[in-house]
């Protein structure tokens, strides 16, 4: 049975997700400021620390205009945190990539973010796995197993429509 978008439980979950996101961005902005970065610059640097990528892909991941990303990367490049280099797969494309200083700064930023990490550490591996799989499902993304869903703490299915999934 489909859940109404205005039932009390759904409204509470939506409010809790909003609170988590707001607190995460607040802490991220504070950590960025400690490195004289804006929140947007820190997010781009963090993303690039995972893998070099072209501006268009950064914009897609951050859900913003490529021209915004170009300005952010320009400022990071001026500070010596990011460099542009040719894409080995297509030399017409430029990749933004962190410098050694940029990678260190991104690691320091990530290490300073305790808001989510500390409460998550208190959850069991099974609870964190279930939370991860539920978040993937909410985003309409396949989970780590390749499907949409996963397993609950007892190994039960978290596929859409399963009894456990709809708890």
Image (tube, rainbow, N blue to C red):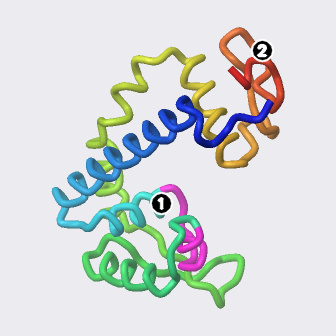
Residue 36 vs residue 135, the one in the foreground: 135
Left or right: residue 23 compared with residue 134: left
Above or below: residue 92 compared with residue 39: below
Is label 1 in a helix, a strand or a loop?
helix
Q: Residue beneath label 2, please?
A: 156
- Tell me: 55 left or right of 25: right
Secondary structure of residue under mark 2: loop
Residue at 83% in and 29% down: 161
Horizontally, residue 83 falls left or right of residue 146, namely left
Q: Is residue 72 magenta?
A: no
| Residue that mark 1 sits on | 47
Image quadrant holding the N terminus, namely: top right
Residue 94 at x, y percent in the picture: 56, 83
Q: Residue at x 72, y 48 (%)?
A: 140
Question: For residue 131, which quarter of the picture?
Answer: top right
- In the rendered image, the vertical position of residue 67 relative to residue 144, given as above or below: below
Residue at mark 2 to residue at mark 1: CA–CA distance: 34 Å
Q: Where's residue 107, x and y in %?
A: 34, 49
Residue in the picture at 42% in, 26% down: 120
Q: Residue at x 59, y 34 (%)?
A: 7
In the image, which residues are magenta?
50-60
Magenta region, mostly helix, strand or loop? helix
Which quarter of the image is occupied by the C terminus?
A: top right
Whole-percent x, y for residue 75 in the image: 30, 81
Question: Is residue 30 shown above or below 58?
Answer: above
Which quadrant holds residue 158?
top right
């Amino acid at each position: 049975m489909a859940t109404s978008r205005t039932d009390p439980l759904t409204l509470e979950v939506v409010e809790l997700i909003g609170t988590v996101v707001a607190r995460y961005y607040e802490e991220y902005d504070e950590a960025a400021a400690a490195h004289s970065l804006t929140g947007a610059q820190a997010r781009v640097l963090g993303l690039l620390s995972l893998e070099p990528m072209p501006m268009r892909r950064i914009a897609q991941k951050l859900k913003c205009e490529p021209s915004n990303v170009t300005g952010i990367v320009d400022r990071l490049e001026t500070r010596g945190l990011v460099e542009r280099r040719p894409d080995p797969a297509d030399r017409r494309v430029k990749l933004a990539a962190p410098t050694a200083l940029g990678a260190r700064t991104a690691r320091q930023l990530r290490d300073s973010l305790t808001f989510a990490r500390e409460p998550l550490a208190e959850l069991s591996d099974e609870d964190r796995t279930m939370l991860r799989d539920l978040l993937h499902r909410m985003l309409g993304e396949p989970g780590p197993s390749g499907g949409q869903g996963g397993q609950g703490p007892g190994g039960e299915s978290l596929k859409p429509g399963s009894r456990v999934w709809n708890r």
